[in-house]
Image (spheres, rainbow, N blue to C red):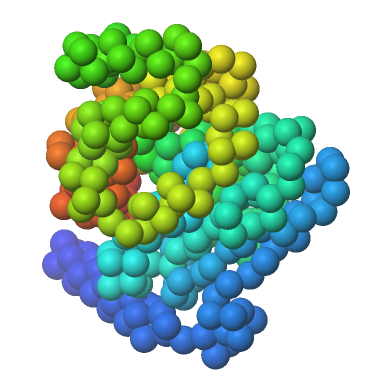
Amino acid sequence: MKIKLLLSILLTIILFSSCKESKTEDTTKANYLDFSKRDDQFTGGIKMIPISTPIGKFKVWTKRVGNNPKIKVLLLHGGPGGTHEFFESFDGYFPQESIEYIYYDQLGSYYSDQPNDNRLWTNERFVEEVEQVRKALKLDNTNFYLLGQSWGGILAMEYALKYQKNLKGLIISNMMASAPAYNKYAEDILGPQLDTRVFTQIKEFEKNKDYTNPKYMELLMNHYYTKHILRFPLAKWPESINRAFKHLNPNVYVFMQGPSEFGITGDATLKKWDITAQLKTLTVPTLAIGSKYDTMDPKHMKWIANEVQNGRFLFCPNGSHLSQYDDQEHYFPGLIKFLKEVDNRYFPKSS
């Protein structure tokens, strides 16, 4: 008799919880595109957020898409000096799942202020910029997911190491935790995969520091980018990607990343960046995304997922560096599953 009573109570609790969750999801879906109670209705979600820096005040561009009180994803683009345009494929997947996301051009990027002062281009200052954006958008650990891709992954990891208490979830997309390890992978694994004559020519241009030579870029675009950056013929690259590359700020990019596409070289400030020893301090639920054909070693991405305390690995078998475009079949279902499972407090660690 007692067993039947306990089972009845348990069933009632499960049904009540299920109905409550379903009602919450229905409300979120119904209000997803309602701008009427938002202070950015006039601009369609765009806000120019004031940022304080050691050399003065500037503004950065953000745009919110949708309403979801429990899942808000701030997107950190690559580069450095890239733009939010690398993420425009998210428009095809997040709205139908009622996931709120925020486009954001970091300081120095095309839609934000672009001060010409290299003192601004440090990891530490960018981290504080992200924190100011978070506060301005009223994001907190009940809803704030931070997704960084490429350089944005570096910034996301650096932010989490200092401010993980503010996060609900962290996504590291297509970025290793060590520049020296990335350099070694590019030099030892990716370069030799190219046609020997092509690789020899590329290395000769780099040896002579002839990075602006049209032939150098032609070799990269036709033989390297289409294998490891975006696995489509150049003529079929999405307009948003072409626009993002057109808008890239070369001053910020070269200062931090360097002029070479085979690792971080020269006097680039990120050349010795390495936080592998610190990852184990991260407790926030973390998704590391790696792709088979990426410029970043997918095995290292799997290692990141196991190194943090609460991690999961998403592998994109058909993807490259921009797997949000060339392997959407795996990228978006895996990402959306992570966001929703963290939101529902169901997050088994990957094996």
Q: Nearer the viewer, residue 137 or 211?
A: 211
126 in relation to 88, above or below:
above
Is residue 178 found left or right of 267 in the rendered image? left
Is residue 184 found left or right of 15 in the rendered image? right
Asked if residue 341 shows in the view, the reply is no
Q: Nearer the viewer, residue 177 or 327?
A: 327
Look at 46% across and 86% down and name the residue there. Answer: 34
Look at 47% across and 42% down and name the residue there. Answer: 78
Q: Nearer the viewer, residue 60 or 330?
A: 60
- Residue furthest out toward the front: 214
- Residue furthest out toward the bottom: 36
Is residue 9 found left or right of 276 in the rendered image? left
Look at 50% across and 25% down and name the residue there. Answer: 259
Query: Which quadrant is home to the N terminus?
Result: bottom left
Q: Position of residue 142 (x, y in %)?
A: 53, 59
Q: Position of residue 299 (x, y in %)?
A: 27, 22
228 in relation to 167, above or below:
above
Q: Position of residue 265 (x, y in %)?
A: 51, 16
Q: Which quadrant of the view contains residue 187?
A: top left
